[in-house]
Amino acid sequence: DTEVTQTPKHLVMGMTNKKSLKCEQHMGHRAMYWYKQKAKKPPELMFVYSYEKLSINESVPSRFSPECPNSSLLNLHLHALQPEDSALYLCASSQGPWGGPGQIGAKNIQYFGAGTRLSVL
Amino acid sequence: DAKTTQPNSMESNEEEPVHLPCNHSTISGTDYIHWYRQLPSQGPEYVIHGLTSNVNNRMASLAIAEDRKSSTLILHRATLRDAAVYYCTAINDMRFGAGTRLTVKP
């Protein structure tokens, strides 16, 4: 099973709402990622978790709050978003832990979910 | 900033081979080269990876230059289902470059 499951598939929220995106994998992977993708653009890295600890935060605004409760689950909590935050949010996981330079190889093959399409009104 | 360079777009005819180039001149000696593709309305999917030697799998082949500063993803017989954005990553931080949008004509 190489599946990464993201819920919900679609989400519409107002700027004052609080919502959460969920990502789950059961492949025993120890690194999990959040990306944001705008239309016609490549995915932009937001956060990296390695062994359930936050390894990378790409200077993401605090209205996005990641959480990794256990090795299979990754959440992205959303609060007070802006219309420009509307995008496709992608979750990914990889077998190996995040190790920095020289760590990319077979263990860092990323498996992506189908994404959550978020609209902020 | 992404450290890979790919053409913005390429076209191919169905059932013909496609060679998708990627330049990664700042690659370090231990960084692998990964290729992913993103079909419309889907998340990216892994295609192939390699370090120094050429690699083949059921989806594609990867040809890596001897100096490792460039690589080429080869689709041996393009199908309409291969129309996607193809990304190469040869850097150590999982950031995607702009990718190449492949159009396959029937």
Image (spheres, rainbow, N blue to C red):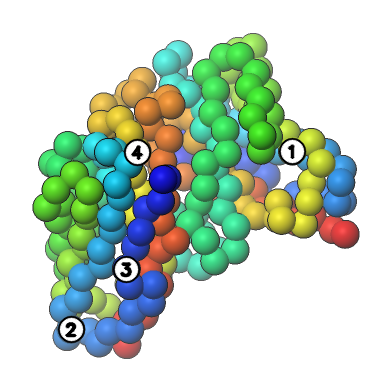
Mark 2 → mark 3, Cα distance in angstroms: 17 Å
Classify mark 2: helix, strand or loop: loop
Task: Point out residue A6 in the picture as x, y percentages from the top left corner.
Answer: 34, 63
Q: Are marks 4 and 3 in contact (CB under 8 Å)?
A: no
Task: Reply above or below: A44 against A84.
Answer: above
User: CA separation, marks 1 and 3?
Assistant: 33 Å
Are callouts 4 and 2 both on one chain?
yes
Relative depth, front residue between A14 and B43: B43
Residue at x 37% of width, y 53% of height: A4
How far apart marks 1 and 2 lie (CA) works out to 45 Å
Task: Point out which mark residue A17 bears.
Answer: 2
Q: Is residue A70 visible?
A: yes
Does dot 4 land on a helix, a strand or a loop? strand
| Mark 1 surroundings within 10 Å by alpha-carbon count, few (fewer than 14), some (14 through 19), many (20 or more) | some
Residue under mark 1: which chain is it in? B
For disc 1, the marked residue is B75
Q: Kindly state the secondary structure of the residue where label 1 is placed.
A: strand
Of the two numbered discs 4 and 3 on the same chain, state the one appearing first in sequence. 3
| Foreground label between 1 and 3 | 3
Q: Residue at x 32, y 41 (%)?
A: A27
- On residue A94, which mark appears? 4
* Callout 2: chain: A
Instruction: Please tell me which residue is depicted at 26% across the width and 67% down the height of the picture.
Output: A21
Say whether residue A35 is visible: no
Q: Nearer the viewer, residue B81 or A46?
A: B81
How dense is the environment of label 4, judged by Cα within 10 Å: few (below 14), some, or many (20 and up)?
Answer: many
| Other residues around mark 2 within 10 Å, as few (<14) / some (14–19) / many (≥20) | few
**Amino acid on which the number 1 mark rests in the picture:** Leu
